[in-house]
Amino acid sequence: MTIYFSLSSSHHSPLPVATVTLNPKSKSISHHHHSPPKSNPNPKSQSTTHHHHHQQQRRCPPTTHHHHQQQRRGGGRNSSVAAAEGTAAASRELPTTTSPTPPPGDIRRKSQLYIHIRKKREKDPAYQLILPMASKFGLAGGIPERRVRPIWDAVDSRQFKNALKLSTALLSKYPNSPYALALKALILERMGKNEEALSVCLNAKEILCTNDSNVFVDDLTLSTLQIVFQRLDHLELATSCYEYACTKYPNNLELMMGLFSCYVRDISFVKQQQIAIKMYKIAGEERFLLWAVCSIQLQVCCGNGGGKLFQLAEGLLKKHIASHGLHEPEALSVYISLLEQQCKYSDALEILYGKLGSLMMIEVDKLRLQGRLLARAGDYIAAADVFEKVLVLCPDDWECFLQYLGCLLEDGSIFIKDTDPIHPLKSTECKNFQISEELFDSRMSQAADFVRKLMVEANDNSARCPYLAYLEIERRKLLFGKGDADKVVEDLMQYFIRFGHLACFTSDVERFLEALDYNKKSEFLKKLVKGCEGNVSGPTKELGQSITVFKIQNSIGDLFALPVNDLEDIAVGMTEMFCKNLPLSKELDVQESMHGEELLSLACNVLVQFEFSSTCIPCYLHKALAENDAANTLMS
């Protein structure tokens, strides 16, 4: 997200533009400045400077253009000729709208006018929204950028000793600069000197939090300190620095966004909400309101506030929509999720069908949301029709098929998110006997017909969902008391023949194996072994199917029933199989996973299991460690 603060006024010469950038993934905030557009006599130099600026925008503002630096240093014949040629080329390509260079007297008068405008603007309350460093263009944390860049270059190239030397020299020239201290602390932390880094950071914090007007406070300094404090596990100190800066500059959006990020890292939902609402009141931007609403939702998820907080969030959104509307799909998603949390499904559907629903441009996503809202509202028939449309568009959407089947069986448990990660609701426990047998048979027949139609229309041999759908229908019949376990085993074998070489096979069929008793599981395992023996589908697929058999054997628990000698033979056989198939990985890229590398982890798993079932614990554990070392050596 980027905010642009322009310092230009009316027709006078343009001033710099400050830019604030918020990275939502790393929750870090950076800032930089852009000079106003100028005619560059050397296009090549301009593109080089632009590329170099993007590499450095995280750490400091960009420099002025290289050709300007050459002119100040005197340049040379080659640079002068190149500049002249670039000027000639530019004049041929672009309309000649630039005026000739003004005499020195005009430049002096314009500079005086620039200073007068800046001083007048600084007295304007609106100017307080601008970054503190915006008036000091070309500075990084109050220090000339050319003195800071070599330090960052050394840090980027991991030359920390050289970076520390340069940082010490910088501190000798700027001993009371919080940014220079923060840079040194960052380097010390990278060198592993955490205590020294913390001491330097605390010194920078002490200087930063003084009332000295000469102390330069900007987000570049604060974000550098925040990085070090976070790596040293002292986030509260970084938060206090941002809180002081926001007190000193109460309407500075960039500093407030930095403080918001600190509260996010501290998991302070209430303070997140407060600072987000404050930013919204200052700027009136949609994103700040959404930050506040999400902070309210997080508070409720943690058991604080409940209905009153939801009403507050809904009121804020309604007021904003009435005056400004919504402009982003994410805003619509947040609004609907807020209504959904309050069980206002009809209101959410009305919004989705209305003008705001046009914000959701992807039709499939809109249909998924519509189906979920209809199901939560209890209209299962309409929801099933919507999910059918989704499956026609996306035939490999497994979650959508489960929701479709849940609607046919009038089972809304699939739409309730499990909030207990320690004791999740198992799929085999989802039994719904609220519908009659006749209706159950009719709905299962309807689902089977739709799946067959889906397989004919899809024509995609790589889509696993339609084949898993048959298994799920048989599993539901088995749970309802009207299924056939032999039919489930047969369908599992058909799925193995088609997809048994994939690494995801075991996780795919795990839910179906849970519905079978031990005898049927053992029968399925025997059929798998027999199916692998007669397989002639190629070495890679044969290897994948062999690995699948080992995984199923381990998943069923059949390994624990075998004698110790047999288990040792299995572990040795896995390792030999891996070594035998090493040539299959010869053409792979170094970053790709090797064919059969799971065999080594499976062999280690077998040996480690002996640790809990054998008297020779050290022997098997050492074998597992040796097996792991061998695996790392082979794969490197």
Image (cartoon, helix red, strand yellow):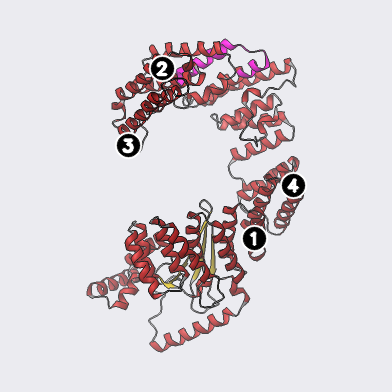
Q: Which mark is residue 589?
A: 3
Tell us which disc is closer to us: 2 or 1.
2
Name which residue type carries label 4: Gly
Placement of the C terminus among the 4 image quadrants: top left
Report crowding for label 1: few under 14, some 14 to 19, many 20 or more residues within 10 A (C-alpha). Answer: some
The residue pinned by badge 1 equals 275
Q: Which residue is disc 2 drawn over?
A: 567
Q: Earlier in the sequence, mark 2 or mark 1?
A: 1
The 10 Å Cα crowd at callout 4, few under 14, some 14 to 19, many 20 or more, is some
* Residue 384 visible at all: yes
Of the residues shown, which amino acid type is indicated by label 3?
A: Asp
Q: Earlier in the sequence, mark 3 or mark 1?
A: 1
- Mark 4 vs mark 1, CA separation in Å: 20 Å
- Amino acid carrying label 2: it is Leu
C-alpha gap between disc 2 and disc 1: 61 Å
Q: Residue at x 65, y 25 (%)?
A: 405
The answer to whether marks 2 and 1 mark residues whose Cβ atoms lie closer than 8 Å is: no
Bounds of the magenta segment:
475-499
Estimate the spatial distance between the alpha carbons at disc 2 and disc 4, rounded to whole Å: 55 Å
Q: Secondary structure at mark 4?
A: loop
Please say if the residues under marks 4 and 1 sit with CB atoms less than 8 Å apart.
no
Q: Is residue 93 visible?
A: no
Q: CA distance from mark 3 to mark 4?
A: 53 Å
Sequence-first disc among 3 and 4: 4
Residue denoted by label 4: 306
Total number of numbered discs in the rendering: 4
* CA distance separating discs 3 and 1: 48 Å
Q: Position of residue 421 (x, y in %)?
A: 61, 35
Image vertical order of residue 632 relative to residue 158, above or below: above
Question: Callout 3 environment at 10 Å: few (<14), some (14 to 19), or many (20+)?
Answer: few
